[in-house]
Image (tube, rainbow, N blue to C red):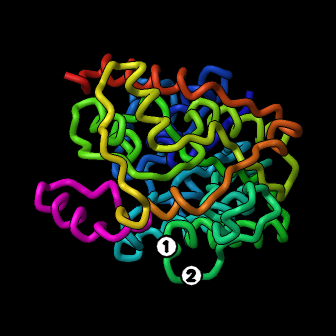
């Protein structure tokens, strides 16, 4: 088995991926930011403290490693967060790639996002050939631009000889969502009747375990400098709530806000959420994804990598089972 380095290994996707890599028998080295270990604290892995946009930290992480999974990213629905989004998602991606080239890493899997693509072609199903959202534009989330720019930086290093495969997950959901993520908060708020209503919109959601397996498949079978979309099931927010209700018995909010109204009241909702000491779930950036796509295809990943995704009902059941086992539903 190989010695594998992972950035972002203490996050939601990272933790699931590290568990999978350990199962496969790899010697795993995980970059730990400020001592964070999350749900992999008790796994037989080597933790290397450091930061992804620090070249010396990356050199230390990659010393003796055969491969690199680069997952470290800042997911934001609230702008650039004083420059942090750009520092990690753009500069950090390049730093990781250059460190991998310097260390002679055999292959790097770079985890980008479906959000790196231009969402303006809203009537067409998203495939890998669509142009990226490299340039900022009115109404386009900073996060989307950062993922496109980070991907572009990595591809520049590919030209210098680095073997990289890039994966683009859609909306990641699933168990082991410790923090939790914004979608994790959605499931919890729905269960605890903290959602006054739903938003009229839809997106593609994929199980975190399927994305982790897709990353492993990309390492094994992906073609150098190729992108692979990893999608799951296209769901409206009402559909998601209905599945959650079937699983838990929780009552679905009756009021469904049309998108034009949801966008109009974002400033009010943000103010109320912050007054309650909570980060808002509905921001203009969060809503952007729910009306900007017609669907996402992972046909390329299915054909070339053997990628598959499980039914949404299984994912939602496992989400609530994990929350219940970890005392999040009491």
Q: Is residue 310 above or below residue 170?
A: above
Is 278 covered by the magenta stretch?
A: yes
In percent of width and height, residue 216 lies at 71, 35
Q: Please give the label number shown on residue 12.
A: none
Q: Please give the label number shown on residue 142.
A: 1
Residue at figure coordinates x 55%, y 35% from the top left: 208
Q: Which image quarter is the C terminus in?
A: top left
In percent of width and height, residue 152 lies at 71, 71
Mark 2: which secondary structure?
loop
Within-10-Å neighbours for mark 2: few <14, some 14–19, many 20+? few
Within-10-Å neighbours for mark 1: few <14, some 14–19, many 20+? many
In percent of width and height, residue 102 lies at 72, 62
Q: Which residues are magenta?
A: 263-285
In the rendered structure, are the residues bearing label 1 and label 2 in contact, judged by CB atoms less than 8 Å apart?
A: yes
Dot 1 or dot 2: first in sequence order is 2
In percent of width and height, residue 276 lies at 12, 55
Q: CA distance from mark 1 to mark 2?
A: 7 Å
Q: Please give the label number shown on residue 136.
A: 2
Q: Which image quarter is the N terminus in?
A: top right
Q: Is residue 80 above or below residue 313?
A: below
Judging depth in this view, the residue of 60 and 12 nearest the camera is 12
């Amino acid at each position: 088995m190989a010695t594998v380095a992972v950035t972002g290994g203490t996050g939601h996707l990272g933790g699931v991926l590290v568990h999978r890599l350990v199962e496969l028998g790899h010697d795993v080295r995980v970059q730990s930011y400020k001592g964070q270990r999350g749900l992999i604290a008790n796994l037989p892995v080597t933790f290397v403290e450091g930061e992804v946009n620090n070249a010396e930290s990356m050199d230390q992480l990659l010393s003796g490693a055969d491969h690199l999974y680069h997952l470290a990213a800042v997911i934001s629905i609230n702008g650039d967060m004083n420059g942090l989004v750009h520092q990690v998602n753009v500069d950090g991606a390049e730093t990781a790639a250059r460190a991998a080239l310097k260390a002679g890493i055999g292959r790097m899997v770079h985890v980008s996002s479906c959000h790196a693509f231009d969402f303006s072609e809203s009537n067409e199903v998203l495939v890998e050939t669509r142009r990226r959202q490299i340039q900022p534009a009115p109404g386009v989330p900073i996060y989307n631009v950062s993922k496109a720019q980070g991907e572009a930086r990595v591809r520049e290093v590919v030209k210098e000889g680095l073997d990289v495969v890039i994966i683009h997950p859609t909306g990641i959901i699933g168990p082991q969502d410790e923090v939790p993520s914004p979608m994790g908060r959605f499931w919890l708020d729905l269960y605890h009747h903290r959602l006054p209503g739903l938003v009229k919109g839809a997106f593609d959601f994929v199980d975190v375990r399927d994305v982790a397996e897709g990353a492993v498949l990309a390492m094994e079978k992906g073609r150098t400098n190729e992108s692979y979309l990893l999608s799951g099931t296209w769901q409206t927010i009402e559909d998601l709530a209905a599945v959650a209700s079937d699983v838990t018995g929780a009552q679905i909010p009756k009021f469904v806000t049309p998108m034009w109204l949801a966008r109009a009241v974002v400033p009010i909702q943000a103010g109320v959420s912050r007054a309650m000491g909570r980060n808002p779930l509905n921001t203009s950036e969060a809503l952007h994804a729910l009306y900007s796509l017609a669907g996402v295809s992972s046909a390329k990943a299915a054909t070339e990598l053997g990628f598959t995704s499980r039914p949404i009902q299984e994912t939602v059941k496992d989400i609530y089972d994990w929350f219940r086992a970890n005392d999040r539903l009491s």
